[in-house]
Structures are given as structure tokens and as C-alpha cells.
């Protein structure tokens, strides 16, 4: 998760700035003026991605007159409208309240400088303010990693549902409408070069589901599904090892930004989503670091040894694993051997499996990069879902909220609508959890899992064998190659594809293969980045046909948000796409 910038503490007052002082005086005069004298309106509910110029044109279309200027900050859903006179302001105030643009009602009120924007307080942001012009320093990490922690859980779900409707579904719909309109304009301009009623013109025809009125939701949305656990729910955490603001070695989450020179590591003792066992492991690691002659790793000059700590824990099987990430390029071999042995003695009693991973690169290691087991015998931990057992190695992906994962997979099973004649294609299958769980809850003809990570695929095969699932086949290959084989006649009967990609979304070749693989009549997309990569991927899956995308477009039939991350802004989205 990206953390907000936290500036280092300042030892003195800020230098004088005439322009800033003049601006402060103007704002103070504006806020001191009676509200009825201002010619500005504070308008909430505008398109957060619209520019001031676009807003002005939109207001002209809705006959909001007398606008002199609009101040709009990018990616904020509010703006300040300035008017030529009081009469125009009052007329706009009456018209803007309740005005729907893009299906969302606006709210307008008289503007005052001290209430221009809904800002978080220092306590809400998890910050401590030492004065109006002093720099901010971390107070606690709770408000940074769990910004919704003070909000009752039912309100969190309502907030996330509204966000998913607006920032995912409405955004995707607008984007797709724009793609079709742009294609229509292009074909209209080049109409003279083609015969009438050509195939190209048919490709640009907007699907019926996109022609619904703007105030009518084009994609049917199911009720948001909540997490059974709201605290201590994470089964995996990646912690940074570094120094806090006092120079003490800490194991926790990084706050600040490197370019501001204000990066530090905050302790996780107050983090609601981290289980107690992982907090105890971090405390033990901090005690180990305090006695270690080797320093924590510094990202700036790439010096030091101790880089990070990855923890996995299953409350259901009581098995746990830890991977300590280190850089040894500046460490003497004898010193490292000694510290590795001491590490096994310090953390070994707290976990089932303890690994170290030596990585001297600048970024982060890949999932398949080697690890060394220094305590334990299995080299993996076991987690259970719906009574099935899953083997998880250090680099394998597994949903980080076990109880909510079962909620998610139930939704996937409902939307898949698989029958005994269905072939289930699990793309990017990882350890095979989705395909195996769906197959355990509904009868399917066959499960085909596709994965490029060899370690995860080996786990998937062992998981299928351990759970007695016979009608499953796992392929270590690129997904587009497997789907090309299906297109060439290897598949018979109805096929449902399930994709659960990383935050970056699906590769363009995989998207094209899904679109062009005609046996796939139903596609279930599980997205952990619904406001970003899902919106972009739907453009390929549901957009107009072309030479590179000759397959019929998919149509969204149902979307269901699932909250796997209580107290945070993140939410998963499961969307069902189908075609004839």
C-alpha cells in the first residue's frame, strides 16, 4: 500500500514568504466576510476525473449560467464555482442541488475559505502536528495502514459499495461508451472508403447494455459481502526492517517517502489487522536486531544487512512461517554465518518454518527466487478452505484473509454457474485454490489450471492429490498458449474461465486470448484493483471487435464487491462476463 508522505520534524520556524503571507491574508479576509457576500459555491459530487474546462462545458449544457471561474483539484469530487454576481450565484445554488450529472446528484452550499475542502484532521491521518507551520511527524501507524479504523464496520461496507459503484462500474461504463463513440466517429469519417453496411460499421455498434439511460446502472450489482473477521485477519504480512525516527531498529511498516528524506519504520503494535502472533514475532525480531552487530538495510546507499520479514500464519492449522530478507554484499562471511545461527535460535521457537533469503538486488525478489530453510522440516505451511488442505510455500500467492477468502470463493462459485458438463479454466491459478474450491462445491467436468510459477504449480498438483481431486489438470505454461490449444479443438462442451490477476491486471496477450477463445462463454474476473486494472481490462474484453480482437465481446451480467480488507480503503470486485 502506498503510504502518505510524512515530512521530517523541523527545528525552527519556516522562512518568511511574502506571497504565502499575502495569500493567507486574502483567505483570512475571505473567511471573515459574511457568507452571503461571497460569490462562490462549494459543490460536492462532481466527476473527480473531470477538468475545470470540462466542468464548465457540462454546466453550460445544464443551463447553469453566470459562472466566472471553476477551481477543480484533480481526482477530487468537489469544486469551487465563482459567479459574476449574487443573482447568478443564487440561481445556480437552487439548480445545482440535486442536479444529476452522470447519474450522481450534486450538493452545493455557500463557500467559505475555511471550509473549502473536506480535509482529514491530524488524528484521522495518523499524524502529530507540532504547530501550524511545523512539519508533521508520525504519531502512530494505525491511521496510515487502516484509514477506516474509526468507522463502524457497516458504514465501511456502505462506503466501499458506493466507491465500487462509482469508481469501478460507472468509470468502466463511461470508458467503454467513449471507446465505442470514438470508433463510430472514425468509421463515419472514413465512410467514403468502404461499401455501405460494412462489417466495420457493425463492429462499432454500441451494445444494448451500454445504451441505458445515464441515471440507470448498466451493470447489475449484488450486495457487498463483508469479512467475518475485522481485526487480526491477515494470514500474511510483509514487514520492513529499518530505523524509526529515533534511530532504533524496528520491524513494521514504512512511512514517508524516500525523495522527501523522511522515510522511517513505524512499529505495528497498534495495527488492528495484524494478528497478535505476528506482533510477537516482530517484537522478538526487534530484540534480535538490538543485539546484532549488523545494521538494518538502507535503501538510499544500499548498505546494511537486515531488509525485511515476511510472516505467514494459519489460525486453523496453527502452522506458521517466517522469511527474513537480507543483503550480504557488504557483510563478511563469518559474521553472516554467526548471525544466521543466532537468528534460528531467536525466532525458531516462534514459527514452524524459518527461512532466510539473500537478495542483493535493488528492488524486491521474485516469487521463485531461492530461500534457505534454517529451522523446520516441511518447507511449507498448510491452510484449509472448505475442509480442503492447501500447501503454501514462501513465494506462492494465497488470499491474505482466510475467512473472507471463503466468502469470495462462494461468490465466484455462484457466478460461475458451472454444471457437470462444464470445463473450468483457472487462469493464473497459483496453488490451485480457486479451481479446487469451486470444484468441491459444484460438480464440474474438468478443471484446467494454468500457472507460470513452477513452485506454485507444484503446490497446486500436490494440493489436488492431497484432497483427492481427480478431474484436474495443471499446466505450467503461458495462458495464451493453453487457450490457443482449446481454440484448436481440445475443449468440448461449455467452458467457464476464472481469472484472479495481480494488481497490474492481465497481460494484453492473455486478454486477447480470452476474448478470441470462442469456447469460453462465461468469464469470472476477480480483481484486487477494481478502480484501476479491472477498468482497463474490461475495455479489451467488452470493447468493439477489431482485427486483433475478432472474438465476440463479453457483456457484464453481475458484479459483487467482497471486502477482504476491513479498516482499509481496499475492496475486491468479482464480475461475471458472458456472451452467446
Image: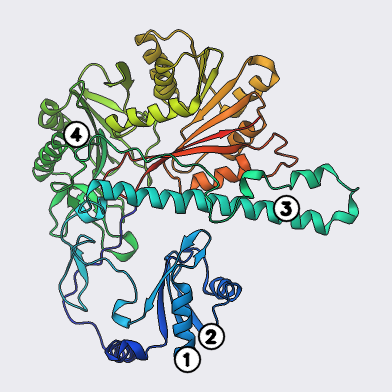
Could you say which quadrant of the image residue 549 lies in? top right
Inspect this view and state whether residue 461 appears: yes
Sequence-wise, the earlier of marks 2 and 3 is: 2
Mark 4 → mark 1, Cα distance in angstroms: 79 Å
In the rendering, at what x and y percent does residue 545 appear?
Answer: 71, 41
Q: Name the residue under label 1.
A: 85
Where is residue 429 drawn, in percent x and y? Answer: 46, 26
Q: Tag 4 or tag 3, which sits nearer the N-term? A: 3
Image marks 2 and 3: residues in contact by CB distance under 8 Å: no
In primary-sequence order, the first of circles 3 and 1 is: 1
Q: Distance between the residues labelled 3 and 4?
A: 66 Å
Report whether 37 appears left or right of 220.
Answer: left
**Residue 170 appears left or right of 402:** right
**Res 348 quadrant in image:** top left
Query: Is residue 455 visible to us here?
Result: no
Badge nearest the viewer, 2 or 3: 2
Question: Which residue corresponds to mark 3?
Answer: 183
Q: Which residue is drawn at 40% across and 13% down?
A: 464
Nearer to us in this view, 167 or 344: 167
Q: Are marks 1 and 2 in contact (CB under 8 Å)?
A: yes
Disc 4 or 2, which lies upstream in sequence? 2
Alpha carbon of mark 3 to alpha carbon of mark 1: how far? 43 Å
Q: Mark 2 points at which residue?
A: 66
Give the mark, 1 or 2, whose residue is nearer the N terminus: 2
Q: Nearer the viewer's eye, disc 4 or disc 2?
A: 2
Along the viewing direction, whichever of 286 and 400 lies nearer the viewer: 400
Question: Circle 3: is it few (<14), some (14-19), or many (20+) Cα within 10 Å?
Answer: some
Identify the residue position indicated by label 4 in the image.
334
User: Crowding near pointer 1: few (<14 within 10 Å), some, many (20+)?
Assistant: some
Distance Cα–Cα, label 1 vs label 2 = 7 Å
Amino acid at each position: 500500500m502506498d503510504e502518505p508522505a510524512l515530512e521530517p520534524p523541523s527545528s525552527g520556524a519556516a522562512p518568511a514568504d511574502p506571497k504565502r503571507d499575502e495569500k493567507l491574508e486574502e483567505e483570512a479576509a475571505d473567511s471573515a466576510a459574511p457568507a452571503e457576500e461571497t460569490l462562490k459555491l462549494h459543490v460536492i459530487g462532481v466527476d473527480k476525473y473531470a477538468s475545470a474546462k470540462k466542468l464548465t462545458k457540462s454546466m453550460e449544457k445544464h443551463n447553469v449560467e453566470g459562472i466566472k471561474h471553476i477551481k477543480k483539484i484533480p481526482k477530487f469530487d468537489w469544486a469551487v464555482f465563482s459567479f459574476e454576481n449574487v443573482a447568478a450565484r443564487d440561481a445556480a445554488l437552487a439548480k445545482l442541488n440535486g442536479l444529476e450529472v452522470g447519474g450522481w446528484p450534486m450538493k452545493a452550499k455557500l463557500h467559505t475559505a475555511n471550509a473549502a475542502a473536506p480535509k482529514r484532521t491530524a488524528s484521522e491521518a495518523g499524524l502529530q502536528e507540532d504547530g501550524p507551520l511545523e512539519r508533521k511527524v508520525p504519531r502512530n501507524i494505525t491511521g496510515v495502514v487502516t484509514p477506516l479504523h474509526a468507522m463502524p464496520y457497516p458504514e465501511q461496507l456502505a462506503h466501499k459499495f458506493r466507491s465500487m459503484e462509482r469508481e469501478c462500474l460507472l468509470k468502466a461504463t463511461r470508458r467503454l461508451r467513449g471507446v465505442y463513440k470514438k470508433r463510430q466517429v472514425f468509421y463515419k469519417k472514413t465512410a467514403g472508403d468502404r461499401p455501405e453496411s460494412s462489417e466495420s460499421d457493425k463492429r462499432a455498434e454500441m451494445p444494448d447494455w451500454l445504451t441505458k439511460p445515464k441515471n440507470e446502472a448498466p451493470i447489475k450489482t449484488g450486495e457487498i459481502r463483508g469479512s467475518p473477521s475485522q481485526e487480526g485477519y491477515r494470514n500474511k504480512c510483509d514487514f520492513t526492517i529499518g530505523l524509526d525516527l529515533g534511530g532504533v531498529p524496528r520491524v513494521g511498516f514504512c512511512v514517508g517517502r524516500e525523495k522527501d528524506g523522511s522515510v522511517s519504520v513505524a512499529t505495528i503494535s497498534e495495527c488492528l489487522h495484524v494478528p497478535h502472533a505476528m506482533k510477537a514475532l516482530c517484537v522478538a525480531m526487534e530484540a534480535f536486531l538490538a543485539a546484532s552487530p549488523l545494521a538494518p538495510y538502507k535503501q538510499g546507499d544500499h548498505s546494511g544487512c537486515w531488509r525485511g520479514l515476511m510472516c505467514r500464519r494459519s489460525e486453523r492449522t496453527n502452522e506458521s512461517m517466517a522469511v527474513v530478507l537480507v543483503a550480504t554484499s557488504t557483510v563478511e562471511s563469518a559474521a553472516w554465518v554467526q548471525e544466521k545461527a543466532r537468528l534460528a535460535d531467536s525466532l525458531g521457537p516462534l514459527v514452524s518454518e524459518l527461512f532466510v533469503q539473500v537478495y542483493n538486488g535493488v528492488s524486491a525478489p521474485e516469487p521463485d527466487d531461492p530461500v534457505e530453510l534454517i529451522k523446520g522440516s516441511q518447507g511449507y505451511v498448510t491452510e484449509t478452505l472448505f475442509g480442503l488442505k492447501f500447501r503454501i510455500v514462501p513465494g506462492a500467492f494465497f488470499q491474505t484473509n482466510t475467512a473472507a477468502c471463503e466468502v469470495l470463493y462462494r461468490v465466484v462459485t455462484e457466478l460461475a454457474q458451472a454444471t457437470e458438463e462444464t470445463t473450468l479454466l483457472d487462469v493464473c491459478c497459483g496453488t490451485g485454490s480457486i479451481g479446487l474450491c469451486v470444484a468441491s462445491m459444484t460438480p464440474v467436468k474438468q478443471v484446467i489450471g494454468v500457472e507460470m510459477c513452477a513452485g506454485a504449480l507444484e503446490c497446486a498438483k500436490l494440493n489436488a492429490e492431497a484432497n483427492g481431486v481427480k478431474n484436474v489438470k495443471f499446466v505450467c505454461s503461458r495462458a495464451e498458449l493453453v487457450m490457443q490449444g482449446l481454440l484448436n479443438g481440445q475443449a468440448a462442451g461449455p467452458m467457464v474461465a476464472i481469472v484472479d490477476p495481480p494488481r497490474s491486471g492481465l497481460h494484453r496477450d492473455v486478454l486477447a486470448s480470452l476474448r478470441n477463445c470462442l469456447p469460453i462463454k462465461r468469464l469470472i474476473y476477480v480483481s484486487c484493483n477494481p478502480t484501476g486494472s479491472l477498468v482497463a481490462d474490461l475495455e479489451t474484453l467488452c470493447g468493439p471487435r477489431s482485427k486483433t480482437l475478432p472474438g465476440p465481446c463479453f457483456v457484464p451480467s453481475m458484479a459483487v464487491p467482497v471486502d477482504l480488507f476491513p479498516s482499509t480503503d481496499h475492496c475486491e470486485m468479482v464480475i461475471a462476463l458472458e456472451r452467446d
